[in-house]
Amino acid sequence: MMTKESIRDLIAARIDCTEIEVLGDDGAHFEATIVSPAFDGKSRVARHQLVYAALGDHMREAIHALSFKTLTPAEREGGRG
């Protein structure tokens, strides 16, 4: 079973993040806000692909639903998200 901590750890291990907040405590449905300089210059789709790649097979096998926002540090400081 996935936890919000295990999702956070998977993302942090594969993406250089300045902030990761994962909410959800039913073991299947999660929400995340991920702030990373790795997202700079990338489209929304490319950002999401990075997150899906970081989670790998867990997205198909252990995580039922994950909604997330991806922001650069500048976007976060500017008030987006």
Image (cartoon, rainbow, N blue to C red):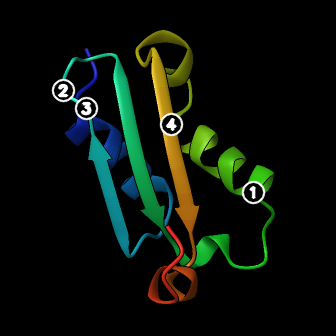
| Label 4 sits on residue | 67
The crowd level at tag 4 (other Cα within 10 Å; few <14, some 14-19, many 20+) is: few
Task: Say above or below: 5 vs 25.
Answer: below
Of pointers 3 and 4, the one earlier in the residue sequence: 3
Q: Are marks 3 and 4 in contact (CB under 8 Å)?
A: no
x and y percentages locating residue 42 in the rendered image: 78, 68
The crowd level at tag 2 (other Cα within 10 Å; few <14, some 14-19, many 20+) is: few
**Gap in Å between the C-alphas at discs 2 and 3?**
4 Å
x and y percentages locating residue 76 in the rendered image: 48, 79
Q: Which mark is residue 54?
A: none
Q: Is residue 4 left or right of residue 57?
A: left
**Gap in Å between the C-alphas at discs 3 and 1?**
23 Å
Q: Are marks 2 and 3 in contact (CB under 8 Å)?
A: yes
| Label 2 sits on residue | 25
Of pointers 4 and 1, the one earlier in the residue sequence: 1
The amino acid at mark 1 is Arg
Query: Residue at point 57% right, 79% down?
Result: 37
